[in-house]
Image: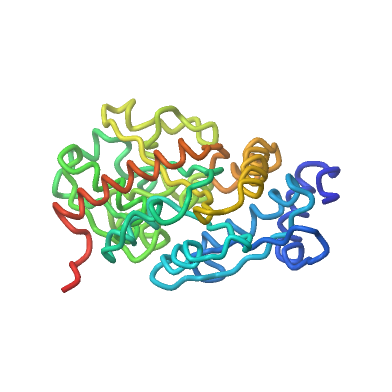
Amino acid sequence: MTAARLPRRTALAALAGLATPSLARADRRNPAELLVGARPGSPVDQWARGVAPFLERALPRLTLAVRNLPGQHGLDMVSHLEQADTSQRLIGVITAPLLLARAVELGQPFPATRIAPLAAVTTESMILVGAPGGPENVAALRALADRGTLGTPAPGSAGHYAASRLDGRLDLPRFAFPSAAAARQAAHSGHVAAAMLPLPDAIAWLREGKLHGIGLAAALRSPLLPEVPTLREQELDLVASAQRGFALNRTAPEGFRAALLRGLEAVATDPDFAERSAALGQAARFLGPEAWGGVLGRADAELRRRWDEEPWLPRRA
């Protein structure tokens, strides 16, 4: 792609503008498909279409097309990838913990036992936010006790999962909204004392002063919002994030697997990709097969434990 030779901001704009047309090209030697378990235009679909040009740039002979398989909350994508013929060049897009939560809700096995986690390239920290002029910090939230409410995105989402891990440590009743956008609006309007959101869903409003950052659920402060303290700094030990990455059929050819792994590591260390991720409130971070599989395994085990103890949705009959 010629965008690599442009100034960085211009390159990012060019990559964003050309993402969909470039995926339609068929003039390269190694066509492959990115399988997205969500509808077109959804956040994970937009992310997949945004990362594809960077992977094409890292692997110049690869052409990528996106196929959306949103059935069963994305688990149809897992089934399609699991059952694929080894001659098919298919790459599944995995968002954790959301996809894992959907498997738990539907009584399906851990997806990583059906497909092979390859690598993750993006991490999204969770952040506790409130209205400007509202509770300033965790101590102020604790003082509210049951007079305040903690808003979250939909059950099973990363923000909802992170908030549930505060039970017994931040005694605010929780209320799950249908989406992160709805929880964000409730926090902005002061209808809830605070909301636990993925940083990408809050960062623009934080930068514009429409929300106040109470605490970041991370080990260290983020360079994206260095003024926002971590929850750990406020004696609330919570590190919570979502990851976006990829998986293959378990019998995918080793050459295809090795090439993709090299390409994804190059993407995660690409300065343009890091800048694009930062603008969206994400962090470019490479997790190889072992580390990515470990993240998925730990999240799955914790979700299943919580589901057994207190399901976040009504159990199916």
Location of residue 31 (image quadrant): bottom right
Comparing 71 with 184, the one in front is: 71
Q: Left of 142 or right of it: where is 23?
A: right
| Residue ID at (27%, 35%) | 138
Horizontally, residue 107 falls left or right of residue 76, namely left
What is the quadrant of the C terminus in the image?
A: bottom left
Number of numbered markers? 0
Considering only vertical position in the picture, is 307 above or below 121?
A: below
The residue that appears at 38% across and 63% down in the rendered structure is 179
Whether residue 19 can be seen here: yes
Left/right placement of residue 13 relative to residue 169 reads right
Q: Nearer the viewer, residue 278 or 86?
A: 86
Q: Look at 28% across and 31% down and name the residue there.
A: 237
Q: Residue at x 67, y 43 (%)?
A: 263
Where residue 162 appears, as percent x and y from the top left, is: 31, 45
Residue 308 is left or right of residue 132, and the answer is: left
Question: Which percent across, then down, holds residue 124?
Answer: 47, 44
Residue 59 at x, y percent in the picture: 74, 47
